[in-house]
Image (cartoon, grey):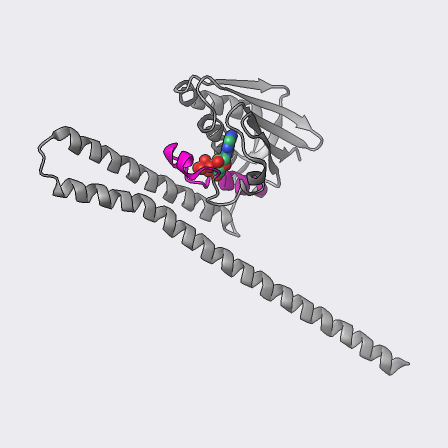
């Protein structure tokens, strides 16, 4: 009867509202936990170089020796810790800017070919320091609409990692092609590779497979999350295929339309 029907419908509606409300609370809870984790991570990351600087400067101040070499060595260490702090802060600023809801991308129709040629040329000296061979293979001429500076940053982060996590005399190949509705930039290295269980976390902020190695090479643990944000803002996809001990291939896929 009608009364029963109204009752059922009202109950259903009430349940929907309650479900939506619970979902909202859950999301707020999650966002709050993520925010707290992020702040804890940032504090930890900033504190590490600061502690080193404090220890180094205290030892310098208490140093009675007149050996200039010791002073120079300690000051060099302080200098590189300051560089580290600078890198972390500029990466954090990039992430914050990219995460803004009202971010405006400066879209321009661009030949990815030219952009990649420019990037590879600028990264060659870094690769040469480790005698790594950087090859660029442009299979097609691809023109798409992108924010050039941002995509450049996303690609540089991935190539920079390929150089960092590949041994001396290694090989890095950057390839451009189209696949279905995407322009694909594939960055392949024959470096250290990523253990299978670490792959799902690789784009998370501050995640590193080997913290010590990442620090040694000046890594902040934020490079890939910045690339992920940039590619996502372009409605693209960034993926990785990797075999531990053999090498990795990162794919940056940007929509052709
Ligand atoms: P980092 O500043 O530590 O390099 P990223 O966010 O750029 O931070 O990368 C996260 C982690 O992913 C790195 O610490 C490293 O362990 C791993 N990684 C990234 N790229 C590669 C690669 N090409 N080969 C092996 N490991 C990689």
226 in the magenta segment: yes
Q: What is the quadrant of the N terminus in the image?
A: bottom right
Q: Is residue 79 left or right of residue 163?
A: left
Residue 149 in view, yes or no:
no
84 in the magenta segment: no
51 in relation to 76, above or below: below
Q: Is residue 187 left or right of residue 47?
A: right
Q: Which stretch did the figure color magenta?
A: 209-232
Q: How many marks?
A: 0
Direction bottom: furthest residue: 3
- Residue located at (42% from left, 35% from top): 214
Q: Who is closer to the viewer here, 111 or 180?
A: 180
- Residue located at (46% from left, 44% from top): 206
Return the x and y of residue 27 as percentages of the image width and height. Answer: 58, 61
Q: Main secondary structure of the magenta part?
A: helix
Return the x and y of residue 103 as percentages of the image width and height. Answer: 51, 48
Return the x and y of residue 58 as percentages of the image width and height. Answer: 18, 45
Residue 77 in view, yes or no:
yes
216 in relation to 31, above or below: above
74 in relation to 134, above or below: below
Q: What is the quadrant of the C terminus in the image?
A: top right
Return the x and y of residue 138 as percentages of the image width and height. Answer: 59, 19
- Residue located at (68% from left, 71% from top): 18
Q: Is residue 232 left or right of residue 179?
A: left
2 in relation to 185, above or below: below
- Residue located at (26% from left, 35% from top): 77
């Amino acid at each position: 009867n009608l009364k029963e029907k109204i009752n059922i419908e009202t109950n259903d509606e009430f349940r929907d509202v309650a479900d939506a409300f619970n979902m909202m609370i859950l999301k707020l809870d999650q966002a709050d936990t993520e925010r707290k984790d992020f702040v804890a991570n940032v504090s930890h990351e900033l504190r590490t170089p600061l502690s080193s600087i404090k220890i180094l400067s205290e030892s310098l101040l208490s140093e009675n020796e007149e050996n200039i070499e010791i002073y120079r060595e300690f000051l060099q260490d302080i200098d590189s810790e300051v560089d580290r702090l600078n890198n972390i802060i500029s990466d954090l600023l990039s992430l914050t800017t990219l995460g803004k809801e009202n971010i405006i991308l400066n879209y321009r129709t661009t030949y990815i070919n030219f952009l990649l040629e420019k990037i590879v040329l600028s990264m060659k000296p870094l690769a040469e320091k480790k005698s790594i061979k950087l090859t660029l293979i442009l299979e097609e001429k691809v023109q798409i609409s992108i924010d050039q500076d941002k995509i450049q940053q996303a690609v540089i982060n991935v190539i920079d990692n390929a150089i960092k996590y590949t041994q001396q005399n290694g090989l890095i190949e950057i390839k451009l092609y189209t696949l279905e509705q995407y322009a694909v930039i594939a960055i392949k290295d024959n470096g250290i590779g990523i253990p299978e269980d670490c792959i799902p976390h690789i784009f998370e902020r501050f995640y590193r497979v080997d913290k010590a190695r990442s620090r040694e090479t000046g890594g902040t643990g934020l490079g890939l999350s910045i690339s992920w944000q940039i590619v996502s803002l372009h409605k693209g996809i960034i993926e990785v295929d990797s075999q531990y001990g053999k090498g990795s291939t990162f794919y940056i896929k940007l929509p052709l339309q």
